C-alpha cells in the first residue's frame, strides 16, 4: 500500500514538474513564436549564382509555407553565397519579424534599406519603412500597459 502511495506521489510531482517546465519553455520561446505580420516575400532577384538562387528559392518556399526558422537559414545560405543579395537580407528580416524577433528583423531590414538606397531603389526603401513601422506598432501594442477603467 505504501509503495502505491509513493508511486502516486511521484507521478503527481512529475506531472506538476513537467507542466512547470513546459510552461517555462513556452514562455521562453514566446519571443520566437509565430505571429504573422508579413505574408509577402521578395521575389528571386536576377543575376544570382546557382548556389545563391537555390538557397534563396528554398527560403521563399519555407517562408510561404510559414516555416520561418528554416527560411532564415536558407536566406542566410543565400547571403553566404552572394553577400550583395539585398532581397535575401530583406526576406530574412521579414522572417525574423514573423518570429517576433524584432531586433534581428530591424538589423536585417535596415541593412537591406541601406543597400536599396545606395542603388537608388526608393520604392524598396519606402516598403521597408512601412514594414519597420508595422513592427514598431506591433511591439508597442504588446508592451502597452492595460488601460484602467
Image: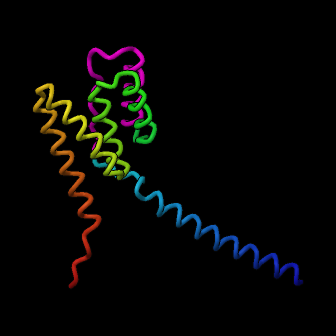
Q: Residue at x 27, y 21 (%)?
A: 45
Q: Residue at x 43, y 28 (%)?
A: 77
Q: Nearer the viewer, residue 24 or 149?
A: 24
Q: Residue at x 15, y 36 (%)?
A: 125
Quadrant for residue 71, please give it: top left
Count of number-bearing discs: 0
Pick the quarter of the image with the N terminus: bottom right
Q: How is the image coloured?
A: rainbow
Where 60 sits versus 96, above or below? above
In magenta stretch: residue 28? no
Q: Is residue 18 left or right of residue 131?
A: right
Image coordinates for residue 122, horizontal then vertical, percent: 10, 32
Q: Which residues are magenta?
A: 38-64
Image coordinates for residue 131, horizontal then vertical, percent: 20, 45
Quadrant for residue 149, please give it: bottom left
Q: Residue at x 27, y 29 (%)?
A: 87
Image coordinates for residue 20, horizontal then vertical, percent: 58, 70
Q: Nearer the viewer, residue 117 or 149?
A: 117
In magenta stretch: residue 48? yes
Q: Is residue 25 left or right of residue 138?
A: right
Amino acid at each position: 500500500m505504501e509503495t502505491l502511495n509513493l508511486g502516486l506521489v511521484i507521478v503527481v510531482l512529475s506531472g506538476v514538474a513537467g507542466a512547470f517546465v513546459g510552461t517555462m519553455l513556452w514562455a521562453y520561446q514566446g519571443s520566437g513564436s509565430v505571429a504573422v505580420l508579413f505574408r509577402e516575400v521578395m521575389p528571386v532577384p536576377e543575376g544570382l549564382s546557382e548556389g545563391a538562387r537555390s538557397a534563396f528559392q528554398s527560403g521563399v518556399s519555407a517562408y510561404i509555407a510559414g516555416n520561418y526558422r528554416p527560411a532564415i537559414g536558407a536566406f542566410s545560405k543565400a547571403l553566404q553565397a552572394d553577400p550583395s543579395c539585398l532581397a535575401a537580407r530583406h526576406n530574412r528580416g521579414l522572417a525574423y519579424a514573423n518570429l517576433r524577433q524584432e531586433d534581428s528583423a530591424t538589423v536585417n531590414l535596415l541593412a537591406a534599406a541601406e543597400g536599396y538606397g545606395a542603388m537608388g531603389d526608393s520604392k524598396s526603401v519606402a516598403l521597408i519603412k512601412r514594414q519597420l513601422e508595422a513592427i514598431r506598432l506591433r511591439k508597442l501594442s504588446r508592451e502597452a500597459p492595460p488601460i484602467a477603467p
